[in-house]
Image: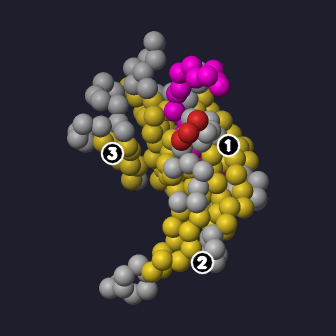
Amino acid sequence: ALQCLSLVGPDAAPVPRGSLRLESGVVDMLGVDGRLVVLTGADRGRTPALLVFDVATPDSPAVVGRREIDAATQLLPCADGRHALVVCSATGFRWNSLPSAGSLRVVDLADPTDPRIVAKVALPATTAAVDGARAVVAVAPSRTEPAGLIPVDLSDPARPAVGRRVPFHDALPSRLLLHGDVVYGAAPYGNVW
């Protein structure tokens, strides 16, 4: 369920406002242009989806837009405030789909009733981070290349410019943070590099 709470004052207890039952669990969410954008998971065999909520009235949040995005695992804001970056992890064979090598997708949220995928970049993405118009993507190893980081220029979100893979031989990070010119990565077993 999506729960809206009000916080009034630094010492105030959260006050429940509205709530809305969701069809799947929440994987990630962010605020964009006064709306809430939620990425749901693949619970109960459902395809992950990007949902756009009107939360102008917190007592009655409402879904105004939806776009299914297979294998979506992470949602990040683009600097322009109009687009979102979605990380789609690689998948194996499933009963209802062929395997996917993973990708980054840029979603245009200008029309909240019709979120549109405006760019798709095929990458074996595992996680990403955004700072301004730049992103960095952790990519899984392939048969011919080691795991690594790939910079992506999002100055024009509809045409992401993919940089050169920088290999690394440490554990593949489960989370990244891009802060200025420095990338921080956290591996699943407690290492930070």
Q: Which residue is mark 1?
A: 68
Q: Which residue is mark 2?
A: 59
Task: Please tell me which residue is depicted at 23% across the width and 41% down the height of the picture.
Answer: 190
Q: Looking at the rendering, in which quadrant would you find the C terminus? A: top left
Amino acid type of the residue that numbered disc 3 sits on in the rendered structure: Tyr
Q: Quadrant of residue 100?
A: top right
Q: Is residue 105 above or below residue 133?
A: above
Query: Closer to us: mark 2 or mark 1?
Result: 2
Q: Is residue 159 magenta?
A: no
Amino acid type of the residue that numbered disc 2 sits on in the rendered structure: Asp
> How far separated are the C-alphas under marks 3 and 2?
38 Å
> Please, which residue is most extreme toward the top here?
143
Figure colour scheme: secondary structure
Q: How many marks?
A: 3
Judge from the rendering whether residue 121 lies leftward or rightward of residue 146; answer left or right. right
Give coordinates of residue 163: x percent, y percent. 53, 33
Task: Please tell me which residue is depicted at 52% across the width and 56% down the height of the picture.
Answer: 29
Q: Which residue is mark 3?
A: 184
In primary-sequence order, the first of circles 3 and 1 is 1
> How far separated are the C-alphas under marks 2 and 1?
26 Å
Q: Are marks 2 and 1 in contact (CB under 8 Å)?
A: no
